[in-house]
Image: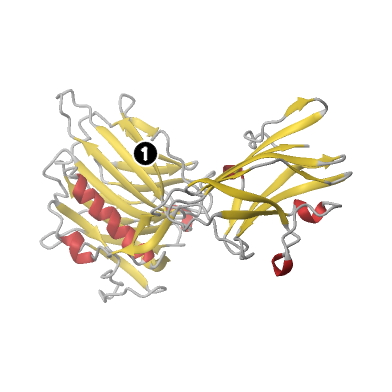
Amino acid sequence: MESSQKSKIFILLYGKMKYLLKSSDFTYDTSSKKYVLVLAEKLRTNRALTLRNVAFQLRSDMTSPHCLLLCSNLAELSSKTVYSTASSHRFDDVIGLLYESNPGRFVLRQPIKIHIENKDVNRLEFWLRTEDGTLMAAEMGGAIPGEAPAVGIDDVKDIAGLRLFLSHEVNQNSAYETKNTVGDNVRYLINEVSGENYLFSGYQDFQIATWGQHKGVQSDASWNYQIDSTSPNALSTSDYTVVWGCKTCAQTNSAVDKFFNFGFCRVRFKYGLIRVLGHPSNDFVDIPNITLQPARDYIISLKQLADDDGDGVHQYVVVAIDLSDYSEQTGTVDAWSSGGNNPQGAFAWYFSDASQHFLSTSGILGPFMVVEGTNAASETKCINFLKSVYSAGVPQEASGSSSTFVIDVDV
């Protein structure tokens, strides 16, 4: 088997191979209710395969039965009936009975021998039935979208210190008409913060694109970018928070995407990494511990922390949330320390620039927010707004831990 399958530890013992199978190595198929592992190399059996020990932990928010019927594709390969139940509850896929030893925890009481003689096994599948034979959904825990009340546009507008908010609901075309339907052309990205005069003007048209259940903008035009040169474009604090949604371009391994340049804060995507101007090089450096996948939707939060010790060195704290599973990656790096890293200065603000195509013509800029200060509640509200519009509700973690199992096998 390939090296990534490290948890299937095998030891040569009295002429047999011993395997430890873990649920984390399997993929759970929600439609078939099966745990599936495709083997990189076929498993050759000579006489029999024995399940020595089985420990199964049911997800804690599920109702726990007294016992479970363990099923597998190994039963179909066996030359003898492995395990059968009486009367109408007879199933050919059952290989053993698991008993509840503690609440939600099931074990195998005696080893089970499965007669598979001189056959190659190229995949392993396990699933569960209840006592009456019903297939049991025992999926792993995960994000459940749309449960909590939505955070709306007005909630974001109430954030203290909000300076820039692009929801993509009020963007305008070249005739200054509001356009917010997917497929519409827009030339101007309109800031929705009252009293702020930020206005991003495109070099060519952008298109309203689908981002989750909300909207973003994209462009397949050459050398397209957005610029706001309204003076002074300055913040009143040295610490700030930038939160945005995006879809990465289709080829992050070969593209350098100048995502935005606000003078004091410059962000690029390169080879699947987030890059910022860093200290002490005053050149672009990678945010550690964060890797972006191509053509994937993300929420990204970047905070520049205040220079508490007065040495002129700030820190960037970046969080990337993968919207395919709501997993989070976090990285911290010292920020650019030269005089240019001054949010109070006058800068033109850009999305992309004239030297390249916007997000390699395949990425999407979702809603975008800039907030003065690094208040945790404000950051959370921005993130929850993006989760809300992306999935029609703030995703919540599953109320129970994941279902897991470990199986000790002799071959």
Residue 331: x, y in percent?
Answer: 36, 35
Mark 1 lies on residue: 330
Question: Is residue 18 at all visible to an observer of this figure?
Answer: yes
Give the quarter of the figure containing the C terminus: top right
Identify which residue is drawn at 58% across, 54% down: 67
Question: Is residue 230 at all visible to an observer of this figure?
Answer: no
Extreme residue in the right direction: 118
Extreme residue in the front direction: 86
Total marks shown come to 1
Instruction: Inspect the image, locate mark 1, and give the three-letter code of the amino acid beneath it.
Output: Thr
Camera-nearest residue between 300 and 221: 300
Give the quarter of the figure containing the N terminus: top right
* Quadrant of residue 302 within the rendered picture: top left
Residue 373 falls left or right of residue 96: left
Residue 116: x, y in percent?
Answer: 84, 46
| Label 1 crowd bin: few (<14), some (14–19), many (20+), radius 10 Å | some
Residue 61: x, y in percent?
Answer: 42, 55
Camera-nearest residue between 188 and 329: 329
Identify which residue is drawn at 41% across, 64% down: 212
- Residue 145 sits above or below residue 272 on the image: below
Residue 9 falls left or right of residue 411: left
Residue 356: x, y in percent?
Answer: 43, 50
Determine whether the residue tagged by mark 1 lies in a helix, strand or loop. Answer: strand
Identify which residue is drawn at 11% across, 44% down: 236
Identify which residue is drawn at 23% across, 54% down: 381
